[in-house]
Amino acid sequence: MTVQTSAVLHTSTAASEAAVAHFAGRLSFEADVSDVAADIGAGVTGWVLVDSRSQESWDQGHVPGAIHLPTREIAARAASAVSAGVTVVTYCWGPGCNGATKAALEFAKLGYPVKEMIGGFEYWAREGLPVETADGIDRRLPDPLTAPRGVACAC
């Protein structure tokens, strides 16, 4: 009989201290779509949401209340668009795009506290959250793989 080796356990797990530092660190750099939506819905202030995509992408749909500031314009326009010291949450298309990371880096270089919204606009729309276009605000049906009906992630 052949003994099956584990692909998961081929590399051992990190020590607890290292794991705590790693995962706490990730949370200091990231916010997810659900947390952003919860804060917006509750009217929480003290941070701004920045869409770093192109004008064409913004026009196709964006998170209501977001500021449109394409990455290539951040260095020149950030000070006039976002008050100093305010935490910035950046987003771009989705998990296959590092545009939000690039935008977050630009804000960090300018001294802003910053996080990126993981999942980006793709997961915002897929979860059935409101999307704004020139025609107004629309809500699409949630993708059952990202926001199952009657089931809460509760994370």
Image (spheres, rainbow, N blue to C red):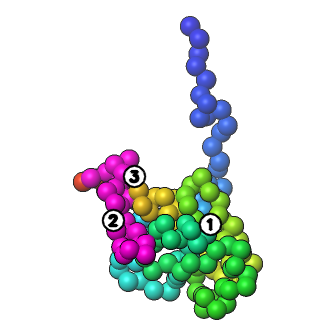
Residue neighbourhood size for the residue with mark 3, other residues' Cα within 10 Å, grouped as few (<14), some (14–19), many (≥20): few
Specify the label residue 100 is tagged with: 1
Name the main secondary structure of what is drawn in magenta: loop
Q: Position of residue 77 (x, y in %)?
A: 68, 86
Q: Quadrant of residue 22?
A: bottom right
Q: Earlier in the sequence, mark 1 or mark 2?
A: 1
Residue at left offset 69%, top offset 67%: 102
**107 vs 46, nearest the viewer:** 107
42 vs 14, left or right, is left
Closest to the camera, between mark 3 and mark 2, is 2
Residue at left offset 58%, top offset 19%: 4
The residue singled out by tag 2 in the image is: 139
For the residues bearing labels 1 and 2, Cβ distance under 8 angstroms? no
Q: Earlier in the sequence, mark 3 or mark 1?
A: 1
Asked if residue 130 lies in the magenta stretch, the reply is yes
Residue neighbourhood size for the residue with mark 2, other residues' Cα within 10 Å, grouped as few (<14), some (14–19), many (≥20): few
Q: Quadrant of residue 43?
A: bottom left
Specify the label residue 129 is tagged with: none
Residue 82 seen in the figure: yes
The residue singled out by tag 3 in the image is: 146
Residue type (three-letter) at the residue carrying disc 2:
Arg
Residue at left offset 73%, top offset 85%: 76
Mark 3 falls on what kind of element?
Answer: loop
20 vs 36, left or right, is right
Residue at left offset 59%, top offset 11%: 2
Asked if residue 115 lies in the magenta stretch, the reply is no
Residue 90 seen in the figure: no
Q: Position of residue 95 (x, y in %)?
A: 57, 55
Residue numbers of the magenta segment: 127-149
Q: Quadrant of residue 69?
A: bottom right
94 vs 152, left or right, is right
